[in-house]
Image (tube, grey):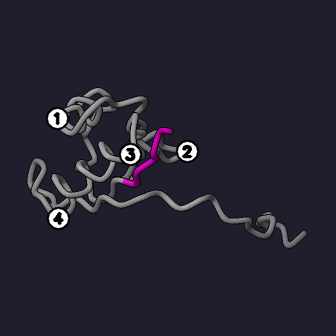
Amino acid sequence: MAKRLYVGGLPYQTSREELEQLFAAAGAVESASIITDKMSGRSKGFGFVEMSTDEEAQSAIEMFNGKDFNGRNLTVNEARPLEERAPRRNSFGA
């Protein structure tokens, strides 16, 4: 079963490929994604990596959590499920 990890503190110029290559040191990476702002398309400084096994995910957490990556300290932990949020109100008060 694959394990999804949250990766915070990414330098804003980090690419999906760089993230995938970094985490490959801990094991097989199923997928990697960088979260971007919908309006500007710029990175928000965090992303998600899905590792092949729980053991590889735990290894990645131990290897990278709190470590420096291109001048920024990474935060790596198990991703939590997306929580339900109330619908957003538009700017016209409706």
* Residue 37: mark: none
- Left or right: residue 56 versus residue 68 is right
> Would you say residue 35 sits in the magenta stretch?
no
Disc 3 crowd, CA 10 A, few/some/many (<14, 14-19, 20+): some
> Residue beneath label 1, please?
25
At label 1, the amino acid type is: Ala
- Left or right: residue 23 versus residue 16 is left
C-alpha span from label 3 to label 4: 20 Å
Question: Can you tell which of label 3 and label 2 is closer to the viewer?
Answer: 3
> Residue beneath label 3, please?
43
For the record, the magenta segment spans 1-6
> Residue beneath label 4, please?
66
Q: Is residue 21 above or below residue 13?
A: above
At label 2, the amino acid type is: Met
Q: Residue at x 77, y 65 (%)?
A: 88
* Residue 39: mark: 2
Disc 1 crowd, CA 10 A, few/some/many (<14, 14-19, 20+): few
Assess whether mark 4 and mark 2 are in contact (beta carbons under 8 angstroms): no
Question: Can you tell which of label 2 and label 1 is closer to the viewer?
Answer: 1
For the C terminus, give its image quadrant.
bottom right
**SS type, badge 2:** loop
Q: Which of the 4 quarters of the picture holds residue 91?
A: bottom right
Q: Nearer the viewer, residue 56 or 43?
A: 56
C-alpha span from label 1 to label 4: 16 Å
At label 4, the amino acid type is: Gly
**SS type, badge 3:** strand
Disc 2 crowd, CA 10 A, few/some/many (<14, 14-19, 20+): few
Q: Residue at x 18, y 53 (%)?
A: 64
C-alpha span from label 3 to label 2: 11 Å
Judged by its main secondary structure, the magenta piece is strand
